[in-house]
Image: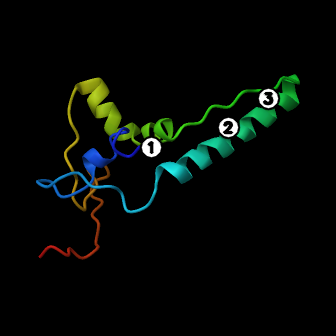
């Protein structure tokens, strides 16, 4: 799901192949989206007496997490370059983790 959702496209060295994120991000993300959906459904049921059908997918969860990068492509047709250890949007945010490739 990381590959299908575009997460791997922005992960890895800028000139190297794509890489999976170190943790299985789609699974806990889907669980979080499900928890929010259940809460919303319970509030709706309390107010209206109607139930709800919940449909959560790993793919949709990855797309939800990729909102910033997806908007670059959807609205401007611009690919997001791999940011290495820096964040491409939050400036002057710089990752202070030591580089291991030097």
Residue 81, quarter of picture? top left
Compared across the picture, whether 90 is left or right of 25 comes to left
Residue named by callout 1: 65
Q: Quadrant of the C terminus?
A: bottom left
Compared across the picture, whether 34 is left or right of 102 comes to right
Label 1, label 2: how many angstroms apart (C-alpha)? Answer: 16 Å
The x and y percentages for residue 39 are 74, 41
Residue named by callout 3: 44
Residue named by callout 2: 37
Q: Residues within 10 Å of mark 2 (few under 14, many from 20)?
A: some
Q: Nearer the viewer, mark 2 or mark 3?
A: 2
Residue 23, quarter of picture? bottom left
Label 2, label 3: how many angstroms apart (C-alpha)? Answer: 10 Å
The x and y percentages for residue 59 are 46, 37
Q: Quadrant of the N terminus?
A: top left
The x and y percentages for residue 73 are 27, 30
| Secondary element at image label 2 | helix
Q: Residues within 10 Å of mark 1 (few under 14, many from 20)?
A: some
Q: Residues within 10 Å of mark 3 (few under 14, many from 20)?
A: some
Residue pictured at 29% horizontal, 73% vertical: 97
Compared across the picture, whether 96 is left or right of 16 comes to right
| Secondary element at image label 1 | helix
Query: From the viewer's perspective, is residue 28 above or below residue 71?
Result: below
Label 1, label 3: how many angstroms apart (C-alpha)? Answer: 25 Å
């Amino acid at each position: 799901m990381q590959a299908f959702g575009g997460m791997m496209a922005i992960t890895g060295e800028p000139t190297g192949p794509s890489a999976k994120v170190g943790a299985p991000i789609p699974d806990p993300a889907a669980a979080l989206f499900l928890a929010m959906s259940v809460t919303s459904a319970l509030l709706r049921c309390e107010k209206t007496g109607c139930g709800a059908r919940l449909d959560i997918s790993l793919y949709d969860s990855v797309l939800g997490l990729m909102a910033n990068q997806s908007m670059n492509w959807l609205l401007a047709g611009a690919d997001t370059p791999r940011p290495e250890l820096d964040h491409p949007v939050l400036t002057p945010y710089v990752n202070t983790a030591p580089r291991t490739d030097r």
